[in-house]
């Protein structure tokens, strides 16, 4: 068995931002935040058309441009007059890649999984204006300013559009060029740091939550040294929605909606406007945080979308996707879908928002279908009546929307964490014991996930909430969902990296011993150093001793594999101390120096 082979090697090559890492990359700071900014207008002959894309050299495919055009305008049924803001999510064209985004993006390494950059989709944030204008043949000025990004920062980018869009509609392209140049001076999006983002005389201050996030979100930390003029506008969150506002007509059904999201069920949200549609879909996706929603979701979807046929075919079961729509035509199109949420204008019943009812799918027939949740789904867990009572009491006492939203978010997060905790505990049991990691053996394997074995652990380590119901049935259904598949793949990769780190630390520790023992033969000194070395057994042989009785071919093979491990550790930025890696490099050089000159020359060139 090869002592330095790893069956859990990390996936995928990393793409560099430029051929020369030291050379400045044009628009690199801009690209860390945005893909591009587009202006979409209405042309009497062409319909929706892209009037301008900035930066000018950004590479969008024709399919992407067409999709952006259609997704940037509300359909005629919405009747949006004045200014309207909403969001969409767009599938990236097959084979397309970004010049600045790679599999091992530093931002993604430090960001929560729910806020990571997307590799296969773009997020679009729209500011649409439709006002009467006698100078236009159609009688209306219709134009959208669209920010396209891989980051799911709805709050930040809608706030940005509120600053720049009104100004752009007055001053046109020169204004947009100035804005893009300002964004190109922004600091990198680093999770956990307070960032000041100046644009058009306004400074937006944000903090992207770090990977380990406390319940209820991370408050923005005020900088200690900067005295900014003008005073910054502090955004409480780059991404969080007002959940109470989004869910106020379906509050008594939150348990059902949470389960539908957890299980990745196909859901259609039919709303009166693209704003309500997109906010509701995004709120649904966030309902299972900190678990990432791994299915597809489209905050705003139209009949012109390139995936329209794919999602509306009746020859196969509906895909695991959440669609937000506004066109009544979809009522007929999506009659075969299992879960449809029909929303309307908010109505009050006394002091409380009127709650929609759960209805049978068979009643979903006409274009004037009433509001309701059309589904035959039966929840696995019972409603949390105490939670609903507290929430409704808060509404009656006229608590601020942000307070009710925080209460709702905390409840959903705690329920998700309670569901995930037994799975996390079971995964920990699949990890090999740390003492089994040796520098002289292949890294030990992670045990396979067994659903039946996990189910047996629920008796002692089941969900800790008082919520009653069929937890076992819910887990079994979850195992068939895209969310389990995505969660397990991600966690298995993280565990593989951990085993890789432990193995590399053991190798580094062995090399440290070899260097120290060659430098100082004092037995007490060596013993002291041995105690400080990570994961090294008392019987461990050091690297130099190992190569004494090996052939040159075996030694060269060892050197190449050690170098590969070093390169992989740095390339994937594994959490191994740089000091250990440097000492391992020194040990490799020591071994190379013991070889004949021709081999030394060959290895130094590689």
Image: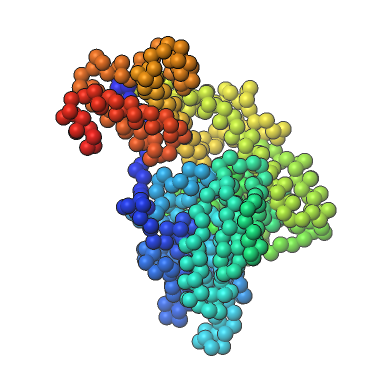
Quarter of the figure with residue 591:
top left
Scheme of image coloration = rainbow
Q: Is residue 134 left or right of residue 41?
A: right
Can see residue 267?
yes
Residue 191: image location, x then y, percent: 55, 47
Residue 600: image location, x then y, percent: 21, 30
Can see residue 305?
no
Quarter of the figure with residue 505:
top left
Q: Is residue 167 left or right of residue 92?
A: right
Q: Closest to the observer: 325 or 84?
A: 84
Q: Closest to the observer: 574 or 259?
A: 574
Above or below 336: residue 58? below
Q: Is residue 452 left or right of residue 602?
A: right
Quarter of the figure with residue 156:
bottom right
Residue 381: image location, x then y, percent: 66, 37
Query: For the point 37% across and 66% down, which residue is it?
Result: 57
Q: Closest to the observer: 118 or 348?
A: 118
Q: What is the count of numbered marks?
A: 0
């Amino acid at each position: 068995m090869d002592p330095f082979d790893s069956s859990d090697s990390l996936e995928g090559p990393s793409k560099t931002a430029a051929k020369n890492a030291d050379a400045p990359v044009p628009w690199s700071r801009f690209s860390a935040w945005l893909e591009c900014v587009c202006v979409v207008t209405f042309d009497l002959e062409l319909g929706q058309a892209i009037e301008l894309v900035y930066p000018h050299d950004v590479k969008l495919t024709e399919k992407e441009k067409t999709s952006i055009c259609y997704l940037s305008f509300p359909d005629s049924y919405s009747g949006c007059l004045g200014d309207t803001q909403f969001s969409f999510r767009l599938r990236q064209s097959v084979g397309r890649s970004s010049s600045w985004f790679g599999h091992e993006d530093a931002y993604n390494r430090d960001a929560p999984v729910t806020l990571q950059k997307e590799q296969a989709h773009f997020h679009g944030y729209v500011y649409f204006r439709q006002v009467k204008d006698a100078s236009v043949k159609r009688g209306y000025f219709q134009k959208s300013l669209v920010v396209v990004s891989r980051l799911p920062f709805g709050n930040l980018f809608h706030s940005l559009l509120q600053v720049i869009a009104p100004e752009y509609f007055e001053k046109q392209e020169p204004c947009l060029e100035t804005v893009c140049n300002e964004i190109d001076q922004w600091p990198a999006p680093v999770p956990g740091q307070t960032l000041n983002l100046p644009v058009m005389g306004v400074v937006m201050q944000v903090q992207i939550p770090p990977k380990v996030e406390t319940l209820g979100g991370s408050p923005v930390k005020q900088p200690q040294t900067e005295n900014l003029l003008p005073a910054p506008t502090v955004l409480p969150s780059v991404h969080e929605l007002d959940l109470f506002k989004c869910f106020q007509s379906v509050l008594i059904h939150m348990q059902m909606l949470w389960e539908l999201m957890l299980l990745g069920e196909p859901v259609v949200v039919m709303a009166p406007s693209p704003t309500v549609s997109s906010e509701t879909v995004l709120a649904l996706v966030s309902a299972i945080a900190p678990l990432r929603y791994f299915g597809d979701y489209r905050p705003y979807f139209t009949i012109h979308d390139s995936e329209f046929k794919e999602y509306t075919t009746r020859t196969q079961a509906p895909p695991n996707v959440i669609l937000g729509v506004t066109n009544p035509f979809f009522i007929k199109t999506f009659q075969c879908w299992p879960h449809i949420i029909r929303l309307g204008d908010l109505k009050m019943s006394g002091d409380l928002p009127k709650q929609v009812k759960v209805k049978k799918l068979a009643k979903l027939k006409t274009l004037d279908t009433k509001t309701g949740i059309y589904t035959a789904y039966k929840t696995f867990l019972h409603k949390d009546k105490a939670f609903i009572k507290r929430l409704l009491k808060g509404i009656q006492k006229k608590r601020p929307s942000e307070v009710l939203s925080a209460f709702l978010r905390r409840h959903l997060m705690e329920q998700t964490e309670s569901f995930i905790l037994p799975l996390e505990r079971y995964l920990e049991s699949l990890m090999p014991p740390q003492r089994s990691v040796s520098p002289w053996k292949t890294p030990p394997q992670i045990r396979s996930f067994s659903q039946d074995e996990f189910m047996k652990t629920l008796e002692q380590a089941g969900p800790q909430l008082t919520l009653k119901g069929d937890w076992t049935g819910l887990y079994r259904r979850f195992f068939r969902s895209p969310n389990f598949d995505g969660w397990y793949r991600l966690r298995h990769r993280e565990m593989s990296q951990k085993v890789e780190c432990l193995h590399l630390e053991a190798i580094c520790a062995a090399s440290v011993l070899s260097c120290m023992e060659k430098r100082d033969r004092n037995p007490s000194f060596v013993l002291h150093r041995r105690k400080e070395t990570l994961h090294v057994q008392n019987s461990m042989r050091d690297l130099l001793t190992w190569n004494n009785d090996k052939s040159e071919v075996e030694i060269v093979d060892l050197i190449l594999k050690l170098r590969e491990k070093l390169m992989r550790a740095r390339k994937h930025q594994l959490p191994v101390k740089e000091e250990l890696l440097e000492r391992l490099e020194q040990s490799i050089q020591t071994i190379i120096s013991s070889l004949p000159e021709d081999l030394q020359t060959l290895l130094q060139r590689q």
